Image (cartoon, grey):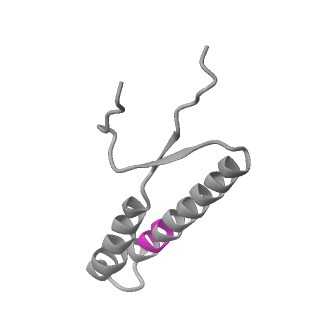
Amino acid sequence: MSSFMEPIPLPSYIHYELLLQMLERKTMFAVNQKSPQQAQVHQLIITLRKALALQKQLEQSCERSNLAVEHRWSLNETNPI
């Protein structure tokens, strides 16, 4: 068994940014003000911001434990053999 561990794959921050920009710039303005849908979009934005903060906490935890992290752009990335 090898002592070398593969880096822990995590989403690239750009994924969060893309979703947040879409929701904040487009979706929020497409729903009626003070509607249940606007409140739901707002909650979705809050949830995504929390997810990003939690990912950063995980990365800090990995760093403290000397575990490598690799930010991925897609599921289809291949690792060299």
Q: Which residues lie in the magenta part?
A: 40-44
Residue 80, quarter of picture: top left
- Image quarter of the C terminus: top left
Name the spot of residue 25 as percent of width and height, x first: 31, 80
Which residue extends farthest right? 64
- Residue 79's x, y, as percent? 36, 32
Residue 73 percent coordinates (x, y) = 34, 50
* In the rendered image, the vertical position of residue 15 relative to residue 26, given as above or below: above
Q: Determine the residue located farthest toward the top in the rendered image.
A: 1
Residue 26 screen position, x and y as percent: 27, 77
Q: Is residue 6 left or right of residue 79?
A: right
Give the vertical position of 21 relative to 2 (above or below): below
Nearer to me, 59 or 44: 59
- On the rendered image, what quadrant is the N terminus found in? top right
| Residue at horizontal 59 percent and vertical 27 percent from the top | 4
Q: Residue at x 58, y 43 (%)?
A: 68
